[in-house]
Amino acid sequence: MEIGYKQAIRITIREKSGRPIAVLTDSKIMAGNGYEVEIERPEVDYATLEDIEKIDSPILLPRQIAGYLKCGQYSINCQAMQDPSKLGFPVIMTGSRVKIPKEGFVNFCRGKEVKRS
């Protein structure tokens, strides 16, 4: 079963025997006796700058650029919280959430001047 939200999440609920079943109530997964819940979130790896440029959003998330930078999204989050200037590209912090302006990131990767506010 696939649920479309900003990123597809495939949820499979199986009996212990392995027979797949699905129980979804008010967007909450209900797992009762005899059920095992397996949640798989497919990762999207944007390996090239061209892939990132094709993303239809002016804002990027750490998970979208981590593959290109060959680092973990958690590393990007930590550095953005500790000292965002060391990343080299602009970031927007909303609480503990990190957002990256696509134009600034692409300019940084292409060696162009990055505007900072």
Image (cartoon, rainbow, N blue to C red):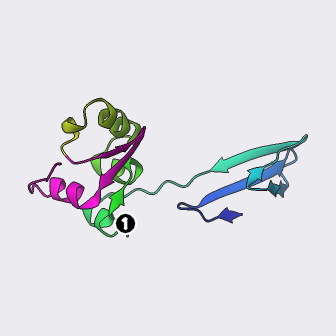
Can you name the residue that lies furthest to the top here?
82
**Rendered location of residue 16, percent (x, y):** 86, 44
Q: Residue at horizontal 78%, vertical 56%?
A: 26
Can you name the residue that lies furthest to the right here?
33
Return the residue nearer the eye: 33 or 115.
115
Q: Report the residue marked by disc 1.
A: 57
Return the residue nearer the eye: 109 or 80.
80
* Residue 76 versus residue 57 in the image, above or below: above
Q: Is residue 78 left or right of residue 86?
A: right
Q: Is residue 12 left or right of residue 49?
A: right
**Rendered location of residue 28, percent (x, y):** 75, 50
* Residue 53 versus residue 62 in the image, above or below: below
Q: Helix, strand, or loop for circle 1? A: loop
Q: Amino acid at mark 1?
A: Ser
Q: Residue at horizontal 39%, vertical 42%?
A: 73
Return the residue nearer the eye: 39 or 25.
25
Q: Which residues are magenta?
A: 89-117
* Residue 49 versus residue 96 in the image, above or below: below
Q: Quadrant of the N terminus?
A: bottom right
For residue 84: magenta?
no
